[in-house]
Image (tube, coloured by chain):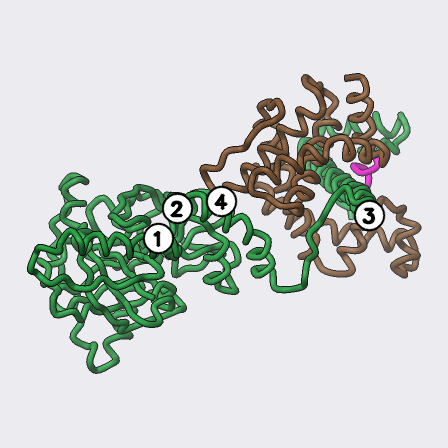
Chain colours: A brown, B green
Amino acid sequence: MGLDIDLLKGLAKQDSNAIDQIYRSNFKMVQNLILNNKGNADDAADIFQESMIVLYEKAINPQFELNCQLKTYIYSVARRLWLKKLQQMQKIGLQTNDFEQVIPIEEDLAQHEHRQASFHIMENAMAKIGEPCKSLLEAFYINKKQMQEIAVEFNYTNADNAKTQKYKCLVRLKKLFFAEYKHIQ
Amino acid sequence: MEDILLIDAAERYFKGEMNETEKVYFEDLRKNNAELDQVVAEHIYFLQEINKFSDHKQLKHRIQETANTLEQEGIINRMPFTGKSKVIYLWNRYKKTIAVAASIAVIVSVFTATIIAVFNPGKHTNIKPLVEKLKEQDVKYKKLATQIDKLNNANTPIPEKPRLESKFRATGFMIDVNNNYLVTNAHVLTEAKNHLIVENNKGDQFVAETVYINNDNDLAILKIIDPDFKKLAPLPFSIKHNNADLGESVFILGYPKQEIVYNEGYVSAQNGYQMDTIFCQLSTIANEGNSGSPVLNKNGELVGVISSMETNSEGVVFAIKSSNIFHAIDEMKKVKENDNIKITSKPILRKTDRVTQIKKLQDYVFMIKGD
């Protein structure tokens, strides 16, 4: 358990070693689950990645507690994600052959889905504002560059000009984002 | 210009870049000005969202790096992407599974991969038509059943009409009892390259031919040309000119299996996939074979024709609005030999209970088969 918590703390910081270790100790288990339930190697790789993201979302929550073994959590998430995928493919009626313990995971996945929807909206809004707005806002908000740096990179005469331009782009991005976002609230 | 200053202040506040005095002053400002506070709160919310987005992108990148390492070590196996179109790729991806599933159980008759591969029209990537392709096993099984039937009937002198083998099954319904015109989906008829059969709920088959097909609104009209077909009583339902209302409850009769199946639902949106105005959206369950099924309201008026469903959400079904049927008829009449089509109905379903409605309706709903 202590090791599990350390790994999760590492994951919350996006520490590569932690990610690597979680992969190595759990991937085979998830792969077995998928391969034994109508999936293939690609499905296994995809489902594992998504499970990692769900786990990360859990790990960064300050109120988070791990009430079971890490592998049980990962297995439960992967299992639920895969069942959902199977249902989407209309292979309804298939049952997983569980060889691991399973815990209820619905709430975490509902939150995960909401987040994914929000990211999707952000991605679309970013795509819609066009260039140079997209690159400018990405540089500032995603890549966290300083305004001074951005001014040089985008050939603005000074940081204030860059700031004005950034502001205009931001207004458009927010408008597009919130127009869609209110639908998922 | 004031807004830009405010947003800038909100961002510095959010990032913790303000000194104590500035912070106190800013918080005071928020407390005393509701409008300003609203702008700041909204912006901070947005910053949180975009921060999560940024985190997420970074995380995905990190995970991918690790995955790449493990792939090189052979711990993760990815299947090579061959550069074929996505659909073929998907087909290849699931081919093995399909074969396994098909050999284990004939009963699990609904699967999507082949149908998507065959039918997915380019512009609608997430919706799939609901025609059911009969699997080879089914066809073989039916052949066997026909042979057994023949053996059983060996003593009866009445010569039996040979049953035709079919590769798909969908639904259609009568709209003109005098000339035996039926409505179904256009995408259904594209499957009937050799012959087209209409089969009633009792299993009687009749030969039909396509008279009108419109791929834009997915409507088609066919005619039963079989001399053995006995004229039906006047149409018990009328076809609605107006759109169904949002929230209106509807029911559906169709052939997702070898017998007529009833289902209920409601109109969940006035337009179809990607705001397509030809369609409306229903919340109900439809399956392969439901393509061309009539959608009726509580008064037994026809309001739509089932066409497709969204593959990645449950219970989202699209129906062609019934008004399109009138357009189809007008178009069809332009051809001389088809101008006899006439829709007359004797609506007798209003204020009758559902069971009676279904009893009256089911003779007018047919399986559409062919190969």
Q: Is mark 4 on a helix, strand or loop?
A: loop
Secondary structure type for disc 3: helix
Query: With B282 as the anchor, is B101 left or right in this view?
Result: right
Task: Tell whether label 1 touches label 3 (CB within 8 Å).
Answer: no
Q: Earlier in the sequence, mark 2 or mark 4?
A: 2
Residues at badges 1 and 2 in contact (C-beta under 8 Å)?
Answer: yes
- Precedes in sequence: disc 1 or disc 2: 2
Q: Would you say the residues marked 2 and 4 are in contact, meaning their CB atoms lie under 8 Å apart?
A: no
What percent of the width, then of the height, locates residue B151?
18, 54
| Disc number for residue B72 | 3
The residue sitting at 79% across, 45% down in the picture is B74
Check contact, mark 2 vs mark 3: CB within 8 A: no
Q: Is residue B337 above or below residue A137?
A: below
In the image, B206: left or right of B70?
left
Comes first in the chain, label 4 or label 1: 1
Give the residues in magenta. B5-12
Does residue A34 appear in this view?
A: yes
Depth check: give the residue in front, B44 or A100: A100
Count neighbours of disc 2 (C-alpha within 10 A) and say few if under 14, some if 14 to 19, many if 20 or more. Answer: some
User: In the orientation shown, which residue stands out farthest toward the bottom?
Assistant: B336
Q: Is residue B237 visible?
A: no
Task: Identify the subunit bearing mark 2.
Answer: B
- Check disc 4: other Cα within 10 Å, few if <14, some if 14-19, many if 20+: few
Q: Distance between the residues labelled 1 and 2?
A: 7 Å
What is the distance, in whole Å, between disc 3 and disc 1 at their CAs?
A: 45 Å
Do discs 2 and 4 share a chain? yes
Q: Residue at x 8, y 60 (%)?
A: B158
Q: How far apart are marks 2 and 3 (CA)?
A: 40 Å
